[in-house]
Image (cartoon, helix red, strand yellow):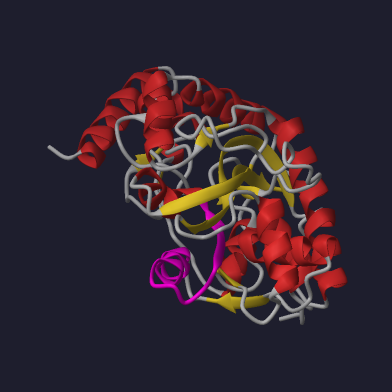
Amino acid sequence: MTQSTTANIAFRQSRAKVHEKHHNCAADATRHPQTGQRACCRACRPRAHWTIRGERGLPGTSGQTFFVENRGGAGGNVGMEYVARSNPDGYTILLATSAFSVNYGLYNQLPYDPYKDFVAVSELATTPNAFVVRVESPAKSVKDFVALARANPEKYNCATPPIGTTPQLLLELFKMREKLPKLADVVFKGGGDAVQALLTGTVELSVGSLGAALPYIKASTFRCLAICGESRWPELPAVPTMQEEGYNGFAIGTDMVLLAPAKTPSDEVKWLESATLKVLQTPEMKDKLFQAGFLVRPKGADAAWARVTKEITTFKDIIDQAGIAKL
């Protein structure tokens, strides 16, 4: 039996128990548009269709069924617009990455207003970026790399994922802060390609998600100069953060938050917030996310919204100051 099958059975059992208290509304029964399951009232309906599927996580702790609906495209704007325009009844939520905060400054026009069309549910997790070189590089620190790049501006370059990703914006911030306009940004389609470019010697530096480079760091193929996070990475205790290296404002990773459409009832938001924070506190979820390269960040709606709005301003400032062309 698959996890999703088990979860659906658990939902039906839970729904039957709830239905005992709501049998009088059977005459108004309708069918859920995704599952076809009969749901006579709010208490009997699947909780949402945009998050984790399986018997663990939210489904396991809440007794509700959750469906994942991936809507990619336009840097995430397609999915974001879909949620912004969804019925604000608590049954459709958005798992957003840092792209939500970046896109406000990156695109000329958005099909939604990030400030007015959403409310925060909770923070989920974060994965830090990192400055990485090959182990044979003479650079033993970020300052070492800066000195080398200044002395040989035509020789040194850097690989990043696409324009507008947090690693690419970090590099632009780094170039402006250290006055390295000739440090070429070699942009690749993804973080894996950027790591391969460093591995083959195509570039001298890579700025990207720590998770993509971590196996090579552990194998002593790469040297991690610094972590772009709020704290050192547990598996790399000797590697300093950018803050420790003297770089303020470089604790920029890829964050994940849950958002809901604006005007979602506060009791629905609070239910989702409480259930999510409960899941994030479990050792199983912490370990599962850590193995995927994430540290849990179990903070509620207020903290999540404060971070999102602050990062909208931060990323827009970097984009504008670096002269990155709008999309």
Q: Number of callouts in the render? A: 0
When the figure is inspected, residue 6 is found, relative to residue 70, above or below; the finding is above
Report the residue at 39% width, 28% height from top.
287
Picture coordinates of residue 293, whole percent (x, y): 44, 42
User: Taking the image as drawn, is residue 96 in sight?
Assistant: no
When the figure is inspected, residue 326 is found, relative to residue 85, above or below; the finding is below
| Figure quadrant of residue 282 | top left
| Figure quadrant of residue 69 | bottom left
Quadrant for the C terminus in the image = bottom right
Q: Of 7 and 229, which appears nearest the observer? A: 229
In the visual, does 319 lie left or right of 19? right
Q: Of 11 and 55, which appears nearest the observer? A: 55
| Figure quadrant of residue 33 | bottom left
Q: Which residues are magenta?
A: 191-209
Quadrant for the N terminus in the image = top left
Picture coordinates of residue 235, whole percent (x, y): 45, 32
Report the residue at 52% width, 48% height from top.
224
- Magenta stretch encompasses residue 233: no
Picture coordinates of residue 136, whole percent (x, y): 45, 59
When the figure is inspected, residue 200 is found, relative to residue 40, above or below; the finding is below
In the visual, does 290 lie left or right of 179? left
Report the residue at 79% width, 78% height from top.
108
In the visual, does 76 lie left or right of 64? right
Picture coordinates of residue 40, whole percent (x, y): 43, 36
